Image: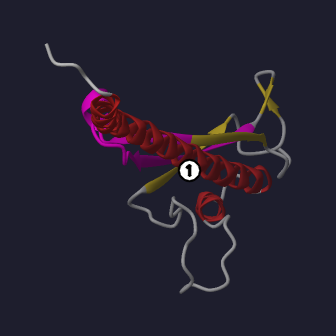
């Protein structure tokens, strides 16, 4: 039986540390990437919710003009010009990626119908692409449907 020296043990310990790093590094990187992906999805949802709130606010004063409500929901982020770089992860102006649904609950005027105030609901829907590897295989899709919605009471025009 061979006697092991301190030098031999240290060399084996160095090899063991390298193996532990090789095994744990992919797991740590997946957790980090998942955290970044979740943060970007949460940020995208906040933008969608803000867009829906802006559309619902405009719709509470002008509930019959659906095109103007959609335009207001799609243009909430300030821009200096059309050629500037869009800083949001969600391009609200892209009609292929982002859809806007507008629903009037009750009559399209200020008042009460069936005991409830008339209101307008704006939903902004976006398919968020997951960047984390293997997540699509686990959940069965490479995208997550994000929906930001807001409902406001109709303030104008008064019902006849």
Taking depth in this image into account, of 13 and 56 the one nearest to the observer is: 13
Taking depth in this image into account, of 133 and 139 the one nearest to the observer is: 133
Q: Residue furthest top?
A: 1
Region rendered in magenta: 119-147
The residue at the point 56 percent across, 50 percent down is: 44
Magenta includes 126?
yes
Question: Which part of the image, by quadrant, shows the C terminus?
Answer: top right
Q: Position of residue 78 (x, y in %)?
A: 69, 72
Specify the quadrant of the image occupied by residue 135: top left
Q: Which residue is mark 1?
A: 44
Specify the quadrant of the image occupied by residue 95: bottom left
Local SS, label 1: helix
- Left or right for 94, reference 120: left
- Could you classify mark 1 by the number of other residues whose Cα lies within 10 Å: few (under 14), some (14-19), or many (20 or more)? many
- Left or right for 14, reference 76: left
15 to 39, vertically: above or below: above
- Left or right for 70, reference 54: left
Q: Position of residue 45 (x, y in %)?
A: 58, 45
30 to 79, vertically: above or below: above
158 to 134, vertically: above or below: below
């Amino acid at each position: 039986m061979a006697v092991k020296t301190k030098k031999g043990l240290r060399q084996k310990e160095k090899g063991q540390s390298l193996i532990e790093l090789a095994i744990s590094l992919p797991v740590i990187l997946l957790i980090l990437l998942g955290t970044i992906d979740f943060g970007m999805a949460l940020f995208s949802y906040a933008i969608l919710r803000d867009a829906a709130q802006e559309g619902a606010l405009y719709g509470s004063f002008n509930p019959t003009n659906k095109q103007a409500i959609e335009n207001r929901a799609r243009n909430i982020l300030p821009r200096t010009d059309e050629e500037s770089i869009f800083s949001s992860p969600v391009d609200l102006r892209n009609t292929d990626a982002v859809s806007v649904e507008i629903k009037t609950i009750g009559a399209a005027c200020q008042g009460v119908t069936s005991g409830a105030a008339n209101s307008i609901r704006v939903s902004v829907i976006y398919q968020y692409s997951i960047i984390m590897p293997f997540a699509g295989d686990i959940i069965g899709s490479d995208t997550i449907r994000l929906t930001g919605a807001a409902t406001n009471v109709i303030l104008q025009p008064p019902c006849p």
